[in-house]
Amino acid sequence: MKKMQKSFFSKLFGNRKGTAEIVGSVLFLVILLFVFTNVYLWHDNASREMNGVLAEKLNTPVSISAFTGGLNVTNNGGFEVGLSRLWLQNVTNTGEMDHMYVDLEHNDFEELNVYIVAGDEIQLYFVGENVVLNSDGSIRAEIDENGDILVWYPIPDHYVRCKILTTLGNMRACTYDPTY
Amino acid sequence: MIKLFNNKRGVSPVVSAVIMILVVMLSMSALFGFFVNYSRDFQTGSGGAVFESMTVEDVWFKDNGEAEIWVYNFGKADLNITNVYVNNNEIGFDPNNNLYIAVGEHGNITVSLGSASGTYHFKIVTARGTSFEGSYSR
């Protein structure tokens, strides 16, 4: 039995015919494995990264409410959240809906970077007698010394639909009622 | 030394082995290069769709029959919007049927709908094949 085994293995390893094919096939498989592992790991990492973004989005819900002369935005989540835009849908005298936005990321002069830490709130005050626009057509906003936001839009004397958009894509809306 | 180079016995197996090694090395390098390129194309192309995300921040139905759709890119890849469907019909849009929105930027699409009131179903498709849908009422 041992003799048979010995002759079988000596034949197998002694015979060098076909060695090149085996080496070539192994190299080919190594390259295939490398590439598909690379693609799979990249996709896995990308999915994980985006899941992180979506988890952060889910954990940063905001709420918005109106008070006389302004709006109150509260971060109800567990992460700091940045504000991107405040949309104002304003029913004008002509009956056409005006959709305008307040740029809360920057104005013509500076970066605003409005952030609300977890559980905190921030006030946006309507100020000015007329609407003041940035060069891109957005309504101008500024930060005062208390950290509140001044929106250069007259205090509305009619119903205005207000929508806040965060930098993570969350939105909330409320209606500004002039009878406040 | 003279003996070494004058002795021609065994030259043929050496030359064939060298040629074989060269052929294998070259073909494997070409194959490797192709796969690396394929992998890079996948990551920047259709594979990158996993990084795309956007939200429709505002839809304004104007009196002149146009609708202005504002979108915000909060994903990790730039968006290239190539098609817009309204109620499952592909329609052209401004600007020039192609809109590029960088990460963290906003963009607007203007489409002509007519003045009929009702609910419109919008589907926005990017070059990587991601689609975002929503229904809005006039």
Image (cartoon, rainbow, N blue to C red):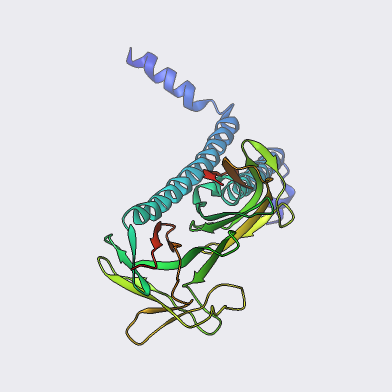
Pick the residue in front: B135 or B119.
B119
Quadrant where the N terminus of chain B lies? Answer: bottom right
Instruction: Give the farthest residue toward the top.
Output: A1
**Image-quadrant location for residue B27:** top right
Q: Position of residue B75 (x, y in %)?
A: 49, 56
Pick the residue in front: B15 or A166.
A166
Residue at 48% across, 58% down: B74
Residue A91 higher or lower than A110, as above or below: above
Tell me, yes or no, if residue B10 can be seen here.
no
Q: Position of residue B113 (x, y in %)?
A: 67, 45
Residue A64 higher or lower than A147, as above or below: above
Instruction: Give the farthest residue toward the bottom.
Output: A145
Pick the residue in front: B93 or A128.
A128
Q: Position of residue B127 (x, y in %)?
A: 64, 48
**Image-quadrant location for residue A171:** bottom left
Residue at 57% across, 78% down: A133
Q: Viewed as shown, does residue A4 lie left or right of B89?
A: left
Residue A15 higher or lower than A95, as above or below: above
**Image-quadrant location for residue B87:** top right
Q: Viewed as shown, does residue B41 lie left or right of A70?
A: right
Pick the residue in front: A66 or B59.
A66
Q: Position of residue B7 (x, y in %)?
A: 71, 46
* Image label count: 0
Residue A31 higher or lower than B95, as above or below: above
Tell me, yes or no, if residue B51 can be seen here.
yes
